[in-house]
Image (cartoon, rainbow, N blue to C red):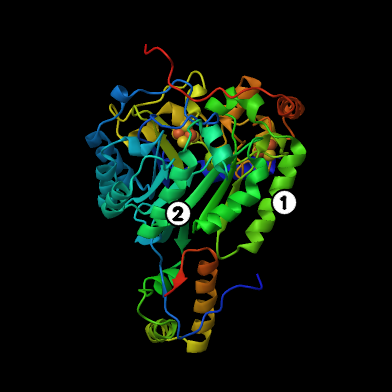
Amino acid sequence: MTTSPELQPTDTVRIPRGVRLREDKARGGWVLLAPERVFQLDPIAREVLTRVDGERTIADIVDDLAAAFDAPRERILTDVRAMLLDLMTKNVLEVV
Amino acid sequence: MTEAMAEYRRDTVSSTAKPVPQPPIGMLAELTHRCPLQCPYCSNPIELTRKREELDTDTWRRVFRQAADMGVLQVHLSGGEPAARPDLEALIASCVESGLYSNLITAGVNISRARLDALADAGLDHVQLSVQGATAEVNDRIANLPGAFDKKLAFARNVTDVGLPLTLNSVIHRHNLHQIPDLVELAVELGARRLEIAHAQYYGWALENRAALMPPREQVMEALELVEAARERLKGKLVIDAVVPDYYARLPKPCMNGWGRQSLNVTPAGKVLPCHAAETIPGLEFWNVRDHGLNEIWRDNPAFNAYRGTDWMPDSCQSCDRREIDWGGCRCQALALTGDATQMDPVCELSPYHDEVQVLAIRDAGRDDDFRYRRFAAAPR
Ligand code: SF4
Ligand code: SF4
């Protein structure tokens, strides 16, 4: 736990090969498909992950979200970072 | 107790006459029973399906389309050895076309680099490689195939080299339980993202070989601690999933997360099952994809409804607050150990058979039987 990776706003993350983001029409909503795992995404997670393209930095994504949802940037950064770190621990997200 | 029952009724009775089950998430496609290995714990049935009875390419394509349409998200291409089928590339492409996540479950001894490239190009998402041990000596003896281990290592390196994510899977029993730390090291060294430490589940060939496989209790407990420690240490680097050895447990495993609830199996000959051992249960008739649509089978085959939900459960499960956690455990294990598939899983402490199971495990762990290797029956029918 003490070794959990750090994540800076200037970092860029991507969904690694073998993990796929897609809509789940049968059940509604979006899912992240990983080996032997299916993560059901809440609407916020979906908004974040659909912006993860391996090009934009975390700061870019946060700016975009702040503009789209008219919400305080600092709060969003904290939430987004926590969520992305969690996904990294689960091996379904990596830093470029 | 009555409170809980009332609650449960409100939960499952819908306004339509027949509640429609949620669609499955995963499908195990057993493409063939042919395999170059002979693992004595193989989950395939004792009576293996021969090549001439296997579904053809177009039928599988249709099954994948139907699976995707009904809501399946992931397909596990399994066997036997799925690479024994020359149309594996085409089948992967068909999964991709239908938007299905494809996972290849392989023994990794008969896939050349060129073939792997072709599978990757077809759009394969993930590879799960089995190892029978952490050294050539143990691996090749359990697989009953000299040279298998070296081929597996070469294959694993090719997988990571191609850039496909790799899971290492090892079925654990008396003869390789001491190698768990080595398996962890091997997984890290090979660049696997995930390691499955799967204690043998005693169905099919493993049931046949139980007295040759069952580990002693103390070793099992030690192994569980080792796995826990490794999991903490490698967090973020290697995901370790463990399938627990349930004969020594107090609570049953949530087998398949409930009968007919999240996943289905299609056998090489096209029968659709709630789990791979389901055919051992007498009195259930399993429908075939040659005659029925997949969704129709999932919804209407009485065999799928036989143990779906909680209605079928014995009273002690009905009134237990774990009934929608473990779903009463495993039907096939209930049958194998009590002779009655409608019993609660006898691994459960509340089962009248619980003590018997412990005695049985301890007895088998103390025996020294030879393997009966997995093979096709000598004489074709
Ligand atoms: S368990 Fe062993 S024998 Fe059975 S299909 Fe897998 S590799 Fe082949
Ligand atoms: S009584 Fe039934 S539901 Fe409760 S733990 Fe035992 S098997 Fe599971």
Comparing B268 with B318, the one in front is B268
Label located before the other in sequence (1 or 2): 2
Looking at the picture, which amino acid does disc 2 mark?
Answer: Leu
Q: Is residue A18 above or below residue B108?
A: below
Q: Which mark is residue B191?
A: none
Comparing B134 with B83, the one in front is B134
Q: Which mark is residue B225?
A: 1
- The quadrant in which the N terminus of chain B is found is top right
Return the chain for callout 2: B
Q: Is residue A46 above or below residue B69?
A: below
Q: Is residue B182 above or below residue A54?
A: above
Residue shown at the point (52%, 88%) measured from the top left: A74
Please tell me how many numbered marks the rendered image carries: 2
How would you rate the neighbour count of disc 1 (Cα within 10 Å): few for under 14, some for 14-19, many for 20 or more?
Answer: few
How would you rate the neighbour count of disc 2 (Cα within 10 Å): few for under 14, some for 14-19, many for 20 or more?
Answer: many
Residue shown at the point (68%, 54%) measured from the top left: B228
Horizontal side, residue B214 vs residue B136: left or right:
right
Q: Position of residue B154 (x, y in %)?
A: 42, 49
Residue B65, picture quadrant: top left
Q: Is residue B255 visible?
A: no
Element class at badge 2 = strand
Residue shown at the point (41%, 48%) measured from the top left: B155
Q: Position of residue B13 (x, y in %)?
A: 50, 41
Q: Position of residue B239 (x, y in %)?
A: 55, 57
Q: Which residue is mark 2?
A: B166
Comparing B108 with B308, the one in front is B108
- Ligand 2 falls in quadrant: top right
